[in-house]
Amino acid sequence: MAAAGVAITLGLTTAACGGGSDSDDKGGNSGGAAGYNAAITGVVNPSTTKGGTLNLWSSQDADSWDPVRGYYAFVWNLNRLYTRKLVDYSAAPGKDGLKLTPDLAAAEPEVSADKLTYTFKLRDGIKFDDGSPITSKDIKYGIERVWASDVLSGGPVYLPGILDPDKTYKGPYKDTDPNKLGLKSVTTPDDKTISFKLTKPSGDFLYLLAMPGSGPVPQKRDTGAQYGKKPASSGPYMFKDIQPGKSASWVRNPNWDPATDPIRKALPDAINLTITTNADDLDSRLLAGTADLDVGQVGVQAAARTKLLSDPNLKKNADNPVSGFLRYAGITPVAPLDNIECRKAVIYAADPTALQAAFGGPLAAGDIGTSMLPENIAGSDANYDPFNRKQGKPQVDKAKEALTACGKPNGFDLTITARNNRAQEVKAAEALQASLKAVGINAKIDQYDGAQQASITGSPDNVKKKGYGIIMAAWAADYPTGSGYMQPLSDSRFIPANGNYNLPEIKDPAIDELFDKANVEPDPTKAAEYYKQINTKIMEGAYYLPVVSAKALNYRNPRLTNVYIHDTFGQVDFQALGVNDGK
């Protein structure tokens, strides 16, 4: 989003994060009746009726309910139920959902002429679930928690690079300020005013304030690493109960005032989330109508997919959007993959069609991936295919040449990881295992609980200790620019001890410098050129094996109201949903 003059127009955005899908029998652009892919472009079953219980299911638990620690897309999406920010994404389908709008802020910020100071005024009447007022100090304290990555691992860490690049602030738990509000770049002259002093202009700054970790936290209720067990609510719902690995439930927050909230309508009286380890059982419940929606939004399994696509009565309640996710394999620096030629051998040996099939084939999985910048992010090039993956076959001869070049002509052993609660990811690991075997690379597969990702594959020390060479993963933009997509994956300054997503541990000063240039470039077209260069450098380094630019065939219970795909998340907007118990 480009900043111009001394005011930021929150409604403007320059890049799409999700959107569009091949479709037949769409339900129309303006919303209304159900239809295949109808929720991509419109609102299905629009309604203002309140009441009832929304029954959500998932095959994986949250990585954390602490807004500063959670990083899964569905967790960020669910955060909108209980975490408000100064600004947030509009509640609308299509490109309109990419627009930022004031949330806790009463209006757009005042921005200084040098574009370094942003000042917000808060709305009147905003409160936490215990009835205490939300002040500027609560917002500052919540943001300060981003600095405490040693205690609160797992979440994104963009803000320190813009507000404290020298890392002089150590987070609220080590803060020597008596009020634990010692971050000097954020000031709160009164309870209704908060001001941010940037070290350099950033066209992406407001996107960072829309992340869950920028929400308010009451200092007196902060329990550090345990805060995710009972987070405070600033939104329309508050937690009733959290049972790790089993369930979570929300009820209405009696101190939320709808007059202060331009985004959320809060239709259900209660929301339940059930965690299951059986994805096929979850699909059966969806089709039977006892579950309303899979919040994972990664697509139904093969058996349900066949039923959905062959039965018109089921298909009309399904959507298959381009999700904004890229599924890929991160190639770590564990020997011999610290050698670029060994990494190239893996990429050439991989069977693009077999990997695509593991995720459901072209219709359900999406197009074969060719690089690390999805087509819905400015700077991407659909024709850029440096490893010739679009031809759809493993390139055995080139893989063997690369093996010889890296000093391993007879191959080598490695370990592939996959999340055990992502059945398609496990199948993809098995497909990769089979194709690597053909060139003498012997891979074993280590499955793990995806809810523990931050401390397992997200810990560089653990990756090296376990000898993980390839990590199956998926990623969508943190915000809709090239930095929001690629920076956590490739910037050397984004390699924390836990919650690391730069899986290859790329440490290329040229890439870091290109991000710095892009982040201060106000012209989105010029910034896109920097992102194009970064993508090229990532692929030239053979750090990642792109698998598919993902689609996800998901089913929505016919009783759901206000269903639409939110382009920011590539998922249904959970906070907008209602239920019609007459269906």
Image (cartoon, rainbow, N blue to C red):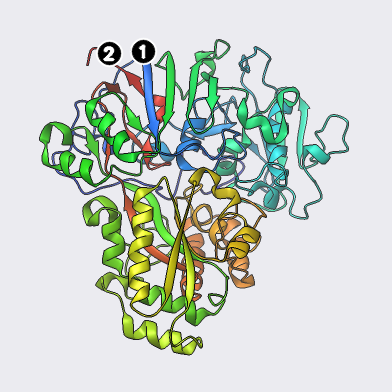
Q: Amino acid at mark 1?
A: Gly
Judged left or right of residue 79, residue 56 is left
Q: Nearer the viewer, residue 437 or 163?
A: 437
Give residue 566's quadrant in the image. top left
- The residue sitting at 36% across, 80% down in the picture is 439
Q: Secondary structure at mark 2?
A: loop
Residue at label 2? Answer: 581
Say if 45 sits above or below 15 in the image: above
Label 1 Cα neighbours within 10 Å, binned few <14 / some 14-19 / many ≥20 = some
Total tally of numbered discs in the picture: 2
Is residue 449 something that shows in the picture? yes
Residue at label 1? Answer: 52
Q: Secondary structure at mark 1?
A: loop
Judged left or right of residue 402, residue 465 is right
- The residue sitting at 72% across, 29% down in the picture is 223
Give residue 289's quadrant in the image. top left
